[in-house]
Image (cartoon, grey):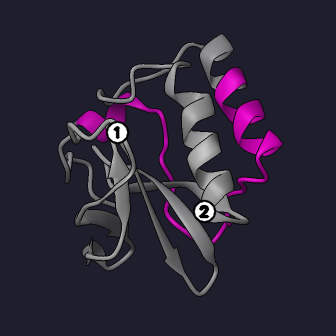
């Protein structure tokens, strides 16, 4: 996984079609058909709706629908400063995980994930 930021936070305050990079096991890959708002990107593939942390390009999780992905992003947005790469406090991380779970957002074990560690900023 890429340890450097691959995208900047967008200035979009609404979900807007916006190209961005995602981090994959093969390296960064372009998404031309995704939507983005501030620090989040969403795109669909054969496994579902991918919610991406734009600064790292890493997968936050897979949502069952576009609406669930957008609502999950809304729900976690205020829990932490997503424009940075760092470590949320335990209480923030618990809120993030519970909010994602409440919208059906899951993380498949076989895909790279957003990991809140200082190592990602290296």
Residue at label 1? 39
The number of numbered discs placed on residues in the rendered structure image is 2
Instruction: Give the image location of residue 70, x and y in percent.
Output: 57, 48
The CA distance from mark 2 to mark 1 is 16 Å
For marks 2 and 1 on the same chain, the one whose residue lies earlier in the sequence: 1
Element type where label 1 sits in the image = loop
Work out whether residue 4 or residue 38 is closer to the camera in this orientation and state it.
Answer: 38
Density class for disc 2 (Cα within 10 Å; few <14, some 14-19, many ≥20) is some
Could you tell me which quadrant the N terminus lies in? bottom left
Q: Is residue 49 magenta?
A: no
Residue at position x 49%, y 63% in the image? 112
* Lateral position of residue 9 relative to residue 16, left or right: left
Residue at position x 36%, y 68% in the image? 34
Instruction: Give the image location of residue 73, x and y in percent.
Output: 55, 40
* Lateral position of residue 82 relative to residue 28, left or right: right
Density class for disc 1 (Cα within 10 Å; few <14, some 14-19, many ≥20) is many
Instruction: Give the image location of residue 13, x and y in percent.
Output: 32, 35
Residue at position x 77%, y 32% in the image? 98
Q: Does the magenta stretch include residue 106?
A: yes
Above-or-below relation of 53 to 80: below
Element type where label 2 sits in the image = helix
Residue 86, by quadrant, is top left
The label number, if any, that marks residue 63 in the structure image? none
Nearer to us: label 2 or label 1 = 2
Residue at position x 64%, y 80% in the image? 47
Above-or-below relation of 116 to 54: above
* Lateral position of residue 19 relative to residue 13, left or right: left
Above-or-below relation of 107 to 56: below
- In the image, the segment drawn in magenta is 95-121
Residue at label 2? 66
Q: Do the residues labelled 2 and 1 touch (CB within 8 Å)?
A: no
The residue most toward the bottom is: 46
């Amino acid at each position: 996984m890429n340890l450097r930021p691959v995208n900047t936070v967008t200035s979009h305050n609404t979900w807007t079609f916006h190209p961005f990079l995602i981090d994959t096991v093969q390296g960064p890959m372009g998404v031309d058909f995704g939507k983005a708002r501030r620090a989040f990107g969403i795109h669909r593939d054969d496994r579902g709706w991918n919610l991406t942390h734009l600064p790292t390009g890493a997968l936050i999780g897979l949502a069952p629908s576009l609406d669930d992905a957008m609502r999950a992003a809304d729900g976690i947005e205020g829990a932490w400063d997503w424009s940075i790469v760092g470590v949320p406090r335990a209480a923030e991380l618990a809120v993030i995980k519970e909010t994602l779970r409440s919208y059906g957002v899951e993380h498949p074990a076989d895909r790279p994930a957003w990991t809140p560690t200082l190592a990602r900023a290296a």
